[in-house]
């Protein structure tokens, strides 16, 4: 089955930008063992396939977790934000505030540019410190926390 860029849903319920996820980047490049089009897509893969945060937000009818009045005490979000396995989770609260301020479409454009190499325009992974294409130094997730 062939997919287009329209199949990608790059705004995560938790506030992550899925476009900088290694699985999504590999799917776009056609090199993925497991394809993923983002956590809000029809077929997320990896951790996102059974993510408790995603399932909770969907079950409550929220597009983003910050719509929930319980976000400040949510054990799922607190765990994710403090999980050393996913340190990029520290950026999600700032991301959701930005989405609230400018809207999801503008935020997606901003994020697409933020996660591209300024030298060659290649998209890169949250944890990359150098562009995978040209080797230019790039800002990893730490710039967003």
Image (cartoon, rainbow, N blue to C red):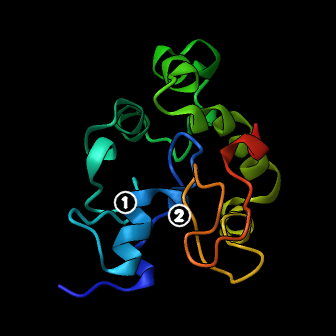
Find residue 14 and report its horizontal and vertical position in percent.
54, 39
The circle drawn on residue 104 is: none
Q: Give the labeled residue for mark 2.
A: 19
Q: Nearer the viewer, mark 1 or mark 2?
A: 1
Q: Residues within 10 Å of mark 1 (few under 14, many from 20)?
A: many
Find residue 110 and report its horizontal and vertical position in percent.
75, 66
Q: Nearer the viewer, residue 128 or 13?
A: 128
Residue 55 makes an appearance in the image: yes
Q: Nearer the viewer, residue 6 or 138?
A: 138
Q: Is residue 104 above or below residue 135?
A: above
Residue at screen point 78% across, 49% down: 98
Q: Is residue 78 above or below residue 40?
A: above
Q: Are marks 1 and 2 in contact (CB under 8 Å)?
A: no
Q: Quadrant of the C terminus?
A: top right
Residue at screen point 72% across, 41% down: 142
Find residue 122 and report its horizontal and vertical position in percent.
61, 78
Residue at screen point 81% across, 58% down: 102
Identify the secondary structure beneath mark 1: helix
Q: Residues within 10 Å of mark 2 (few under 14, many from 20)?
A: many
Residue at screen point 53% across, 63% down: 19
Identify the secondary structure beneath mark 2: helix
Residue at the right extreme?
A: 101
Quarter of the image where one finds residue 114:
bottom right
Tally of numbered discs: 2
Residue 7 makes an appearance in the image: no
Q: Is residue 33 above or below residue 5?
A: above
Q: Nearer the viewer, residue 36 or 119?
A: 119
Q: Quadrant of the N terminus?
A: bottom left
Q: Give the labeled residue for mark 1.
A: 23
């Amino acid at each position: 089955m062939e997919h287009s860029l329209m199949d990608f849903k790059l705004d995560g319920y938790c506030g992550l930008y899925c476009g900088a996820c290694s699985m999504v980047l590999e799917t776009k490049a056609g090199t993925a063992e497991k394809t993923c089009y983002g956590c809000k897509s029809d077929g997320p893969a990896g951790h996102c396939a059974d993510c408790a945060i995603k399932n909770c937000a969907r079950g409550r009818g929220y597009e983003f977790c910050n719509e929930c009045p319980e976000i400040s005490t949510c054990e799922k979000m607190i765990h994710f934000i403090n999980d050393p396995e996913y340190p990029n989770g520290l950026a999600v609260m700032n991301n959701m505030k930005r989405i609230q301020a400018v809207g999801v479409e503008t935020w997606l454009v901003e994020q697409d540019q933020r996660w591209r190499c300024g030298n060659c325009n290649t998209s890169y992974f949250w944890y990359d410190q150098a562009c995978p294409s040209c080797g230019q130094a790039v800002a990893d997730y730490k710039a967003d926390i």
